[in-house]
Image (cartoon, rainbow, N blue to C red):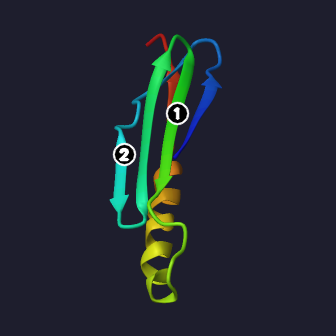
Amino acid sequence: HVKCDYRLELPAGMRVERVPDKTSIKSEFGEVTIEYSMSGNVLVATQIVSFAQSRIPPDKYPNFRDFVNTYIRATRQRLRLVNAAP
């Protein structure tokens, strides 16, 4: 599996309105987990991706494509920044 941490330092005086919920995707092809957390003014997105198969038979391509597209959509969640002080 592959684990990646992405860090985004928020501008001074800003905060994330709502940190997205954990996302888990499982299929016969593998598993994806995406988690978000805050560490001070840094947003951390952790992605863990593991593939269960190294070769995909041609008849499984449509299902594999759906798995990959679901993963891509999960990585495109939008975050809204708001002023930290009301």
**Image mark for residue 8:** none
Specify the amino acid type for callout 1.
Answer: Ala
Q: Is residue 76 above or below residue 10?
A: below
**Image mark for residue 45:** 1
Q: Secondary structure at mark 1?
A: strand
Q: How many marks?
A: 2
For the residues bearing labels 2 and 1, Cβ distance under 8 angstroms: no
Residue located beneath label 2 in the image = 23
| Residue at the image position 57 percent from the left and 19 percent from the top | 42
The quadrant of the image that shows the C terminus is top left
Dividing the picture into quarters, in which one does residue 18 lie? top left
Residue 77 in view here: no
Q: Position of residue 58 (x, y in %)?
A: 52, 87
Specify the amino acid type for callout 2.
Answer: Thr
* Residue extending furthest toward the front: 54
* Residue extending furthest toward the bottom: 59
Q: Residues within 10 Å of mark 1 (few under 14, many from 20)?
A: some
Q: Is residue 70 above or below residue 85?
A: below
Q: Position of residue 11 (x, y in %)?
A: 65, 18
Q: Is residue 81 above or below residue 34?
A: above
| Residue at the image position 54 percent from the left and 67 percent from the top | 54
Q: Residues within 10 Å of mark 2 (few under 14, many from 20)?
A: some
| Residue at the image position 41 percent from the left and 30 percent from the top | 19
Between discs 2 and 1, the one toward the N terminus: 2
| Residue at the image position 43 percent from the left and 28 percent from the top | 17
Left/right placement of residue 36 relative to residue 23 reads right
Dividing the picture into quarters, in which one does residue 34 lie? top left
Q: Position of residue 82 (x, y in %)?
A: 50, 25
Q: Secondary structure at mark 2?
A: strand
Q: Nearer the viewer, residue 5 or 60?
A: 60
Residue 55 in view here: yes
Spatial CA distance of label 2 from label 1 is 11 Å
